[in-house]
Image: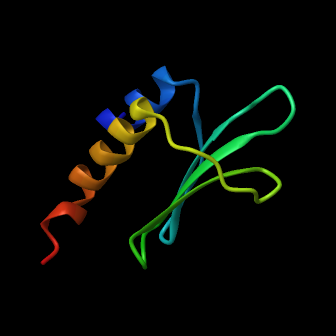
Amino acid sequence: MSETDKLFEELGYEKIIDNFDTIQYEFEGIYMDNEIRFDLKTRTIIKEYSNGESQEISMQELQAIYQFCKEKGWLNVK
């Protein structure tokens, strides 16, 4: 298990997609699920509710996102 997976797990997220194009973590909420999705081809990140509405990113989530980017080498882009 990667450090990123551990950080997201500590926040209550579960990795539900892990393939060539996408890695997605999901947190089951009371009313709607929260999703953080990493597009590996475009190196973009989306956090949204399961209905597609965007939402804020907490500092703890930002730390996990930063760790993901660090592990994938995304921070070394010039």
Q: Quadrant of the N terminus?
A: top left
- At 41% across and 30% down in the image, what residue appears? 60
User: In terms of depth relative to the viewer, which is nearer, 17 or 61?
Assistant: 61
Residue 33: x %, y % from top left: 76, 39
- At 19% across and 61% down in the image, what residue appears? 75
Q: Tell which residue pokes out farthest to the front in this image.
A: 56
Residue 57: x %, y % from top left: 51, 42
Q: State left or right for residue 12 relative to residue 48.
A: left
Q: Quadrant of residue 63?
A: top left
The relative height of residue 57 versus residue 59 in the rendered view (above or below) is below
Q: Is residue 2 visible?
A: no
User: In terms of depth relative to the viewer, which is nearer, 25 or 18?
Assistant: 25
Q: State left or right for residue 72 relative to residue 46.
A: left
Residue 27: x %, y % from top left: 66, 34
Q: State left or right for residue 53 relative to residue 64.
A: right
Q: Quadrant of the C terminus?
A: bottom left
User: In terms of depth relative to the viewer, which is nearer, 52 or 3?
Assistant: 52
- At 28% across and 43% down in the image, what residue appears? 67
Q: Tell which residue pokes out farthest to the top in this image.
A: 10
- At 87% across and 32% down in the image, what residue appears? 31
Q: Quadrant of residue 52?
A: bottom right
The relative height of residue 15 versus residue 30 in the rendered view (above or below) is below
Residue 41: x %, y % from top left: 42, 78
Q: Is residue 27 visible?
A: yes
Indicate the colouring scheme.
rainbow
Count how many numbered circles sit on residues in the image: 0
Q: State left or right for residue 27 relative to residue 59.
A: right
The relative height of residue 48 versus residue 61 in the rendered view (above or below) is below
